[in-house]
Image (cartoon, helix red, strand yellow):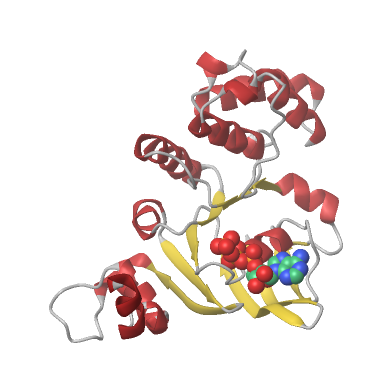
Amino acid sequence: MLIVKQISKNFGSFQALDTISFEMNKGEIVGLLGKNGAGKTTLMRILTSFISASSGTVSIDGDDIAKHSLIIRQKIGYLPEKPPLYGDMTVQYYLRFAAEIKGVPKNKRQSQLAKVLQECDLESVKLKTIATLSKGYKQRVGIAQAIIHEPKLLILDEPTSGLDPIQIQQVLALIKNQREQRTVLLSTHSLTEIEQVAQRVLMIKSGKIVLDDTLDELLKNKDSGQSQPLTLEQVFFNYHPQHTLEKSELQVMDE
Ligand code: ATP
């Protein structure tokens, strides 16, 4: 479904991504982990053809994104960190507009609108202007615009950021339900969220993939010789040992 080969991205002399390669199969939900600045958003922006890679190739469902960016955009749904919402539009008007710009044929727009309103539980707010919605509803509108054209691949950049615990569960349930219909790549800083929805984890550190494994394998901890299974948090800190609280940081906290 998605094949990423040797992607690198330079911003001037700074290398944000360094020869990233991985594949994703149809129907997988993959969690993308990494601390701030690791390169997650840059990778997602390349996969969605918002920016181009400095080198390497990406193919989605058999099409090379550099050669077929228009076709590719129809195959991808993208929820950026800051969703592209227009506050003065009603939910319904905005989603109709999203369907139109994403190339949903005129005779299918109404049924697609009804489908995403139902799927994202937005029926009760469809006539409200977006600016008046809570953050959780806004995020669901963001997901609705990302799936209204039935993309095969859904890319979600920190979809639960800033939501309260109930809103988080609603968004996670919505993401889980996508599994039947499409492949999903999502980034988040919450390891428990990854454990709830993903089957596989990709970890980026300083622009490189340092881990690509299924959650089952990771948490089984078969090689460590420990009796307790690992948590995803332990796995994360194993790759970022300098970020466990060091003596100097503890001293600062004490002061
Ligand atoms: P976060 O979790 O904070 O969103 P991230 O993993 O998504 O972080 P990126 O936003 O991809 O990280 O950034 C990776 C690195 O590339 C950072 O050091 C960032 O400052 C740098 N970077 C990103 N975009 C640009 C740009 N347009 N010009 C220069 N540097 C950039």
The quadrant of the image that shows the N terminus is bottom right
Of residue 8 and residue 150, the one placed in the foreground of this image is: 8
Question: Is residue 203 visible from the viewing direction of this image?
Answer: yes
Above/below status of 176 relative to 253: above
Q: Quadrant of ligand 1?
A: bottom right
In-front residue for pair 188/254: 254
Exactly how many numbered labels are in the figure? 0
In the picture provided, is 108 more to the left or to the right than 142? Answer: right
Asked whether the viewer can see residue 60, the reply is: no
Residue 207 located left or right of residue 170: right
Residue 67: percent from the left, percent from the top? 87, 62
Residue at point 38% right, 73% down?
236
Name above or below for residue 156 compared with residue 14. Answer: above
Q: Position of residue 143 (x, y in %)?
A: 58, 38
Specify the farthest residue to the right: 67
Say above or below: 214 vs 197.
Answer: below
Image quadrant where residue 243 sits: bottom left
Q: Look at 61% across and 50% down and name the residue there.
A: 81
Residue lying furthest left? 227
Q: Quadrant of residue 48?
A: bottom right
Residue at x-position 75% and y-position 72%: 57
Residue 60 at what x, y percent from top left? 70, 59
Picture coordinates of residue 204, whole percent (x, y): 54, 74
Q: Quadrant for residue 59, please give it.
A: bottom right
Classify the position of the C terminus by image quarter. bottom left
Q: Is residue 4 above or below residue 25?
A: below
